[in-house]
Amino acid sequence: MNMTTIQYKCPNCGGPLQWSATKQTFACDYCGSEFTEEQLKIAFPDIENKTLEENVEEPEVKEFEENTSLYRCGSCGAEIIAETTTAATFCYYCHNPVIIEGRLSGDYKPSHVIPFVIEREKALSIFKEWCSKKWFLPNDFKSQQQLEKMTGVYIPFWLADCKADARMTALGKKVNTWQSGDRIYTRTKEYSVKRSAIVDYMKVPADGSSKAENSLMEAIEPFDYTAMKPFSMSYLSGYLAEKYDIKNIDVLPRIKERVTSSSESILRESITGYSMVIPQSKNINLIKTTWNYTLFPVWFMTYKHRDKSYYFSINGQTGKLAGTPPFDTKKGVLFSAGIGLLASVLLGIIMIVGGII
């Protein structure tokens, strides 16, 4: 007798779901998500009429596999995607030469790309203007040799479309104060407040590179998704691209953090009419997540000063810049000494003038 098996997949990461008798929920051992039967029905409205394990049609990857090569940096381990016509390149993280590793698997073919809008000269102009406002930068930081290291790179990003089940309980207080004669009276009424909502999120971003600092990538957001294009090899021409080394399941905690923060704000802002609101409990649960692997345009530069690396990035679409400036200790000391000398001179002048008076 032939038997058909049905395996329920996690709506967030695709891992197998199992019923937890202890927790009385459907649990995923891969990403730690838990779901009630009600939440699964929201994630999959036709859950009883279909299996959740379905074959997804593979995208056409032949062109991608045939026209890309993988370069590996022997110094820092970064992996760089470039066209097969690229004879040699360098690592934009540590600036050491890299070697060809081989063909890139179609598994790393992005579905979409946001093309560069900011040209190199414009990116350099933005960077120079930023430098002009910093007093204590090392002299070679703005040198032509350093500026030549600025590289246009497509950074891998995971975009998550999420459905969140958000719930909150709070204590609401209404306080009334009035005066009668010489006395002031205050009356406080307390209310138990509950809020719940199913919130849809579209394209919540998280970079898929372990080399790129998350805070740096987040600092140059947002990107304009209306300019997103289906991926084509032509967009790589003249630029490099980084191969993702963090899978979508591994960025899920960062997605959850951003969704949780936003959902809390939405629920909190819906509680109005009270003098004071004290949150008591909250439960934000992702009940369905779909993923889109996309390349975002970034102008990237690395600078080493006193054995420390400084990273700078410019949004290749909007021109927004982020980075931590290096500090030239000698300039700082000379400046402090100059301020001290000036203060001494001014003090001496004041004392002389005071003596004359």
Image: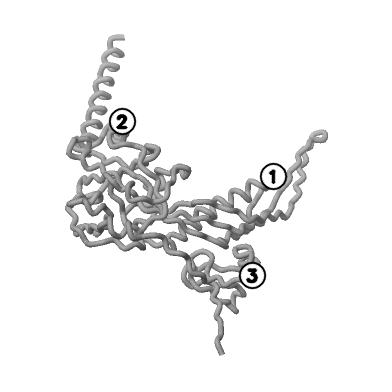
Q: Residue 131 in the image: x percent, y percent?
A: 29, 33
Q: Quadrant of residue 281?
A: bottom right
**Vertical placement of residue 152 versus 335, above or below:** below
Residue type beneath disc 2 = Glu
Tag 2 or tag 3, which sits nearer the N-term? 3
**Apparent side of residue 324 relative to residue 21 in the rendered image (left or right):** left
Q: Determine whether label 2 and label 1 are within 8 Å by CB.
A: no
Q: Residue 207 in the image: x percent, y percent?
A: 39, 53
Q: Which residue is mark 2?
A: 129
**Apparent side of residue 216 relative to residue 289 in the rendered image (left or right):** left
**Vertical placement of residue 41 versus 127, above or below:** below
Indicate which label's residue lies in the foreground, 3 or 1. 3
Tag 1 or tag 2, which sits nearer the N-term? 2
Residue 37's label in the rendered image is 3
Residue type beneath disc 1 = Thr
Spatial CA distance of label 2 from label 1 is 45 Å
**Vertical placement of residue 158 versus 341, above or below:** below
Q: Residues within 10 Å of mark 2 (few under 14, many from 20)?
A: few
Q: Residues within 10 Å of mark 3 (few under 14, many from 20)?
A: few
Q: Determine whether label 3 and label 2 are within 8 Å by CB.
A: no
Q: Foreground: 239 or 319?
A: 239
**How is this picture coloured?**
one colour
Spatial CA distance of label 3 from label 2 is 56 Å
